[in-house]
Amino acid sequence: MSLKVGIAGRRGTCFAPALHTHADAELVALCDIDAGRLQEDADKYEVPLRFTDFSEMLEAVDAVVVATPMQIHAAQSIEALNAGKHVLSEVTACVSLDECERLVHAARESSGMYMMSENYCYLKDNVLVREMARRGMFGDPYYGEGEYVHDVKFLHHNPDGSPTWRYYWQVGQNGNTYPTHSLGPVMQWIQAVDPADRVHSVSCMGSGRHTDPEHPHDDTTITLVKLRSGRLIRLRLDMMSNRPHLADFYSLQGTHGVYEASRIPGQPGMVWVGENPPPGPTPDVHREWRPLSDFEDLLPGEWRNPPKEALEAGHGGGDYFVIRDFIEAALGRRPNPIDVHTAVEWTAVGLCSQVSIQNGGAPVAMPSFH
């Protein structure tokens, strides 16, 4: 069976090359409200069907990639699920807790499948750390960090000075409004050891507004995510500060060792792992920092010898593997790696952080979505 796939939103065209190379998927449609840009992209990627109306496109496809501005992700995903279509949604999944509830309901009632496209879970280093965690190399992981530090002030206004969607939905409110890039990989590392662990509560505090006080969003917010097990994750979001791009810093601390990504471009992430010394006088047990690349032979096979299309895909090949997993899961060949329950949990961390920061950092319990 070959799935006919449509893409809504220009951001989604990054998946076009991967869709063209998948034997069981056919990219047949693009949708964009900008008719001129639509024709340009459809010609570039040789896509036959072109739509400016999302509902009309749904009639022509089996599956849809929702890559529109984040405030309409949930509405379009729910519409597609109600129509029985498979959905791959960009992040975040929703912009309100009520949308999270309605999205879960739509996915439960649909014959289609919902997956969230959190491509930072598909960065090569993050895949490798997940496999190392699964093999027990860090022991029991109990603390992790994820940071998304990306100066995107230039994206808050259009050339004519009018506000973009980001003005309202990313920096128009306070808290961690973009949590899943930082949270997703760390949650997967912990769940590689303890699949049942989930978010219990969220606390958030901010640095105040210093760089661009037009917006209510603090320059930096720190979000503490407490898991049911007692484990802790610290998230940093900063889309304002005048500093270099650092959108993929992570760390993981376990009972047997630690992983630390680099904060400096071009320098490797480092790992310090090994057997702990027994109680009593410390014997001569030697451990030292090693580059993460020393462990690349532990990568899953498709990552050790990726096809040409993966090497050319965005996000370090992640965009290729996201599409691969989506198509395979939609066809029932493998489990859904980021299903609707995971998507709304990771998204709700940010939504709960907005409540917490308004209340001086008080913990907010993670809702249960039915």
Image (spheres, helix red, strand yellow):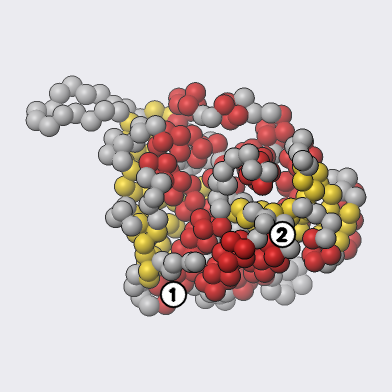
Q: Which is more N-terminal, label 1 or label 2?
A: 2
* Residue behind mark 2: 84
Q: Point out the frontmost of discs 2 and 1.
A: 2
What residue sits 38% from the left and 78% below the top? 359
Of 196 and 177, which appears nearest the observer? Answer: 196
Q: Amino acid at mark 1?
A: Val
Q: In the figure, residue 71 lies in which quadrant?
A: bottom right
* Residue behind mark 1: 355
What residue sits 80% from the left and 54% below the top? 61
Q: Secondary structure at mark 2?
A: loop
Place of residue 10 in the rendered image (x, y in percent of width and height, measured from the top left):
76, 56
What residue sits 75% from the left and 68% below the top? 159
Apparent side of residue 280 relative to residue 348 in the rendered image (left or right):
left
Of 158 and 244, which appears nearest the observer? Answer: 158
- Is there a contact, CB below 8 Å, between mark 2 and mark 1? no
Return the residue found at the far left: 280
Q: Is residue 241 above or below residue 186?
A: below
Q: Amino acid at mark 2?
A: Gly
Q: In the figure, residue 363 lies in which quadrant?
A: bottom left
Q: Secondary structure at mark 1?
A: helix
Place of residue 326 in the rendered image (x, y in percent of width and height, measured from the top left):
65, 46
Of 264 and 13, which appears nearest the observer? Answer: 13
Residue 272 visible, this angle: no
Apparent side of residue 310 relative to residue 216 in the rendered image (left or right):
right
Place of residue 69 in the rendered image (x, y in percent of width and height, measured from the top left):
68, 64
What is the C-alpha distance between the residues marked 2 and 1? 34 Å
Q: On the rendered image, what quadrant is the N terminus found in?
A: top right
Q: Is residue 76 above or below residue 273?
A: below
Mark 2 packing: few (<14 Cα in 10 Å), some, or many (20+)?
some
